[in-house]
Amino acid sequence: MNSKLDTLKTWVDEAEHIVFFGGAGVSTESGIPDFRSVDGLYNQKYKYPPETIISATFFHKRPEEFFEFYKEKMLPLGFEPNVTHKVLARWEKEGRLDAVVTQNIDGLHQKAGSKNVLELHGSVLRNYCTRCHRSYSAEFVKHSAGVPLCDCGGIVKPDVVLYEESLDQDVMYRAAQAIHDADLLIVAGTSLTVYPAAGMIHYYRGRRLVLINRDATPYDNQADLVIHDSLGKVFSQL
């Protein structure tokens, strides 16, 4: 493990265009649960499968049940950035990190100070009326009784990508470009099983691909450096 960390430290020191691509494992150490681990949302028992509840069809047909689940399980407020978020923000401030590409919707990268954050799946911090497009805060949604409604009567929808919805093409393009131009790509805290987000790794053309995750991923054999450990342990030494 020490030799792998030494290698990673050297690569970080030598890199001029780092891009970090992260998933739910980045935020679990802030206390936000993930989806696919043993204790994750997908392995808990609900009236409907979580994949069904957070789909566009369910949102439109059963908004009351959608928001009951969303407010309780998917609206993380009051959490703080952890060491991984903070190190990445410092690297960006130092001019060595070009972008953070994230599958998370919690806004913790921005809270830590990162500026160029490309949110593939949107953010719970942005919410808009489906009728007049007025913007609302996450606190408004959280504390609304039942379905959050705009003054115009429209439903206030979180700006997150639900199942059956397409990812924002502009964000996808910018993420692909950043990954393509990187001289060091660090992929961390993701199982790399959710597409199309996981496919972003194919845009990388550099020679230093690092995968950091507790468990093995389908891309481990394609990486130049693989570390199976917690992100907090790794980034606390960077």
Image: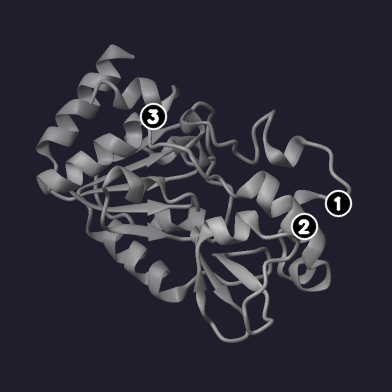
Q: Position of residue 55 (x, y in %)?
A: 72, 64
Disc 1 residue type? Tyr
Look at the numbered discs 1 and 2 and tell me whether their residues touch, using CB distance below 8 Å: yes
- Find disc 1 in the rendering and name its residue: 48
| First in sequence: mark 1 vs mark 2 | 1
Disc 3 residue type? Val
**Secondary structure type for disc 2:** helix
Look at the numbered discs 3 and 2 and tell me whether their residues touch, using CB distance below 8 Å: no
- Find disc 3 in the rendering and name its residue: 226
Q: Give the alpha-carbon distance from disc 1 to disc 2, as whole Å.
A: 6 Å
Q: Position of residue 206 (x, y in %)?
A: 24, 50
Q: Residue at 62% across / 54% down in the picture? A: 142
- Find disc 2 in the rendering and name its residue: 53
Look at the numbered discs 1 and 3 and tell me whether their residues touch, using CB distance below 8 Å: no
Q: Position of residue 3 (x, y in %)?
A: 26, 15
- Label 1: how many residues lie within 10 Å, few (<14), some (14-19) or many (20+)? few
